[in-house]
Image (spheres, rainbow, N blue to C red):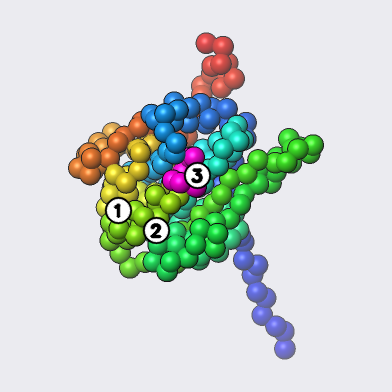
Amino acid sequence: MKGKKIAAVEPPPRLPVMAHMFDQFYRVILNLPGFKSKDSLVVLVSASAVGEGASTIALNLAYAYAHDSAKRAVLIDGNLRRPSLHEHFGVPREKGLTDLVEDGLSLEEVLLRINLEDTDSSLYRKQTPPSFHFLPVGRPVPNPTIFFQSAEFQTRLEALRQAFTFIVIDGSPLVRYPESSLLASRTDGVILVIRHEATSWEVVQVSKRYLQMTEATIIGAILNHKRFFIPEWIYRYL
């Protein structure tokens, strides 16, 4: 009797780490309001809909900050609906943000250190590679809106402010899920990611209105998946 063939399970694809664009991402960070005047800055990265690249932008902002700064940074997966960052790093989602807030775990129990050597080891052969910390999403919660409204979440966010200079949070899509605009109001500002030629202006306007309803600060927008009809490197000389 022949045994059944078991198909190999493909690991989820990793998000693109754009090391060649770290300088551009760091330039975005340097121009964030309050970056030079505040001891700690908390930024939410979100989009109007799924698939616009908010997680990729958040990830690369964290990598770029660690690459060009000696100060401490943490990347938080705040997408309680469809988290993906833990899959990128190949770690479980448990023992993360929700466990920190609801189960009283310490920061040491939930934070993971990410070395940039894993991105390009050739850059750091003769020196200690820079790093940042990653806070996974944690176990599922029944109501993300109530979670971000809680006083305990605010307390834990303030503790993170004391521990890190730069905090970037990957959030759920703004139009579909109400908790993202609420979370934005708890941060110093939100960067809205817009997929070029995919997201309509009307949908972006809805996201903007939701953010304004919670009095969140809109820092700006990043146009993602923009194609260059002139080779990209030429734009540096224009």
Q: Residue 97 versus residue 176: which sits nearer the camera?
A: 97
Q: Which residues are magenta?
A: 161-167
**Which numbered marker is on residue 80?**
2
Residues at marks 1 and 3 touching, judged by CB atoms closer than 8 Å: no
The residue at the point 73 percent across, 41 percent down is 128
The residue at the point 41 percent across, 40 percent down is 43
Picture layout, residue 100 above or below residue 65: below
**Label 1: few (<14), some or many (≥20) within 10 Å?**
many
Amino acid carrying label 1: it is: Glu
* Disc nearer the start of the sequence (2/1): 2
**Label 3: few (<14), some or many (≥20) within 10 Å?**
some
Residue furthest to the right? 126
User: Which residue is denoted by mark 3 in the rendering?
Assistant: 164
User: Which residue is denoted by mark 1 in the rendering?
Assistant: 179
* Disc nearer the start of the sequence (3/2): 2
Amino acid carrying label 2: it is: Leu
- x and y percentages locating residue 46 in the rendered image: 38, 43
Q: Is residue 13 in view?
A: no
